[in-house]
Amino acid sequence: ELEVKLLKAVSHPHLLPLLGYCLSPDGVCLLSPLMRGGSLEARLRISDPDRAAQLRRLGMVEPPRPLTWRQRVRVACEATEALVYLHSKGIVHRDVKPDNILLDENLTAVLADTGFAKDQRPDASVRCRSTALYMSTGYLCPSISKGGEYSSKTDGYAAG
């Protein structure tokens, strides 16, 4: 429910939009656009059979060509724009990684998976005081593993 509340409160061209949702006793179902370009992780590892299978499930018949460095930089900049926007709203993502950067058919990037995001503003109804390990370990800021708190700086570390 917190993710729905957060997604309804934000809007940015490089944040995965919330088209609809269903709340039930069994959980939450979020409806968002299908990003046919796959995740940045899948596009960076297209030689991995599991990642190639993910892309085929999105409708790609032919394996995509590797991203050029120019495309990689553009994708990183677009995802960073979304992260800066969230931070300007007092929101910390807490799970920035290539699997959570999705691409459309034109390789336009959106930052996705705000399930661990928290509102850091002093007046927020739910503030992030947890030091639980939410981020994937390969992108985790060392200060978090030493008991530090999540912040825009830890998101920045994860983004690279």
Image (tube, rainbow, N blue to C red):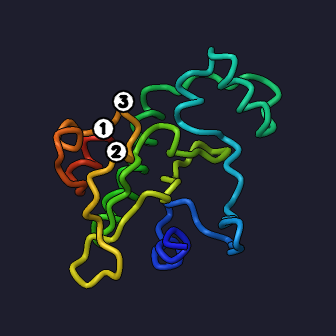
In this rendering, the label closer to the viewer, 1 or 2: 2
Please state which of residues 78 and 70 is positioned toward the viewer in this rendering. 78
Do callouts 3 and 1 mark residues in contact (Cβ within 8 Å)?
yes
On screen, residue 48 versus residue 85, left or right, reads right
In this rendering, the label closer to the viewer, 2 or 3: 2
The dot on residue 79 is none
Sequence-wise, which precedes: disc 2 or disc 3? 2
Q: Position of residue 76 (x, y in %)?
A: 40, 41
Q: Which residue is mark 2?
A: 133
On screen, residue 157 versus residue 110, left or right, reads left
Q: Position of residue 105 (x, y in %)?
A: 68, 44
Sequence-wise, which precedes: disc 1 or disc 2? 2
Q: SS at mark 1?
A: loop
Q: Is residue 152 above or below residue 67?
A: below
Q: Is residue 104 visible?
A: yes
Residue at the bottom extreme of this rendering: 123
Please state which of residues 80 and 22 is positioned toward the viewer in this rendering. 22
The dot on residue 140 is 1
- The three-letter amino acid code for the residue at tag 2 is Leu
Q: Which residue is mark 3?
A: 138
Identify which residue is drawn at 40% across, 61% down: 117
- The three-letter amino acid code for the residue at tag 3 is Gly
Q: CA distance from mark 3 to mark 1?
A: 6 Å
Q: SS at mark 3?
A: helix
